[in-house]
Image (cartoon, rainbow, N blue to C red):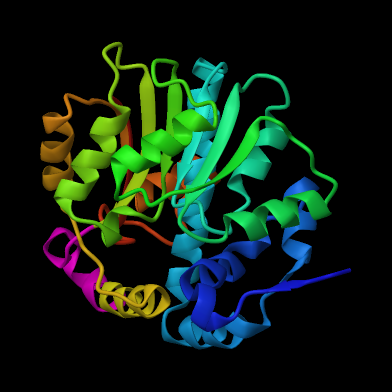
Amino acid sequence: MRLVEYKLSAASSSALILTIAKSLYNSGWSREYISRIDFSAVEKLAAELYTISPLYHTLLQLRKRMVRYLIDELLEQHPRQQICILAAGLDPLGLQIAEHYPTQLRSIYEIDKAHMHEKQELYASVSFNEVRLHHLYADITNPPLMMETLIKAGYTPHEPTLIIFEGIMHSITEEQFLRIMRAFCSRARNNAVIMDYILPQENLPSAFVPRANDMLEVMETATGSRLKQYSRKKIMNLLSLLEAEIFDVYDMQAAEYVLNGRNKMYHTKGEGMMEMVAFSI
C-alpha cells in the first residue's frame, strides 16, 4: 500500500486537524482513505497539543459531527442539490457525502488552493470513481475566480446549493466573508450554508475562560495564525446584510445534547467557545 505523507511544513494545519479527527472516519470509503495517509509528520504535535488542551480534540470532533448532522438535516429536506465544500483541505467529507447519498445529489465540489490533486489520487486509490465529485483549485477569498472555476466544472449558479463553510470564519475578515457569501446569494434564497465561528472571551462563562484561552493557543498553533473571533450578535448582523434566513444556531452545549442526548462536556451556554449556524441566502 502506498502511503501519501504530508510534511508538516507543507500541510500542517490540514493534516494536523485530520489526524485529530481521524477516529470519526471508521467505516466505508473514508476509512480506506484515512488508512492511506501517513500522519507521522504531525502525530507528535497532535499529542503535544492534547496535553495542553484535551478539550480541543473533543471540540474539533464535535464540530465535525455537527456539520455532518446539519448536512443530513438539510439534504433530507432538499435532496436534489449541488454541494460546495469550501477550503476542503484533506477532510474526506465529499467522499462521505457521496457514499451516503449515492443517487440524490447532483454534484459535489471540493474547493481549495492546495491538496486537491493529492486528494483525487487518494480517492482513486480506494477504487472510488464518482463522476459527481470534483476537486477544484481556487482561492475562496477571490470569489470571481472561485465562481469561474466552479462554473467551468459544471456548477449551475441558479440551482439549489448547500455550501459547507467549516473552519474558515476565524481565518478571514468580515469583508471577505460577505464577498464569498454574496457570490452564492440567489434570488430564490434556495442556497443553504453551514458554518462555525469562535466566540470572543466576553461571550463565554467566566469559569470557562481559562480553558478557552488554552484552546485558543492550541488552535493558533495548529493553524499558524491569529484567529478572529465573532460574537453571535456580530454574526447575526453580518447575515442580516445578506438578508439571510436563519435556520438554527447551536452553541456547543446544544450541539452536544443534539448529538449525544445528554451533556457530558458542556453544561453551560457558551462553553466550548464555538457556535454553529445554518442559514439560507
Residue sitting at x 68%, y 28%: 101
Residue at the far right in the pictured view: 1
Q: Where, quadrant-wise, is the C terminus in this rendering?
A: top left
Tell whether position 204 is magenta: yes
The prevailing secondary structure element of the residues shown in magenta is helix
The tally of labels here is 0
Residue 179 picture location, percent across and down: 21, 40
Residue sitting at x 50%, y 82%: 9
Q: Is residue 156 visible?
A: yes
Q: Is residue 94 left or right of residue 218?
A: right
Residue 249 picture location, percent across and down: 30, 38
Location of residue 198 by image quarter: bottom left
Residue 246 picture location, percent across and down: 26, 27
Tell whether position 265 is magenta: no
Please provide the residue range marked out in magenta: 199-211
Q: Is residue 242 left or right of residue 57?
A: left
Residue 248 picture location, percent across and down: 32, 32
Query: From the viewer's perspective, is residue 179 above or below residue 201?
Result: above
Q: Is residue 261 visible?
A: no
Residue sitting at x 78%, y 64%: 35
Q: Where, quadrant-wise, is the N terminus in this rendering?
A: bottom right
Residue sitting at x 18%, y 43%: 235
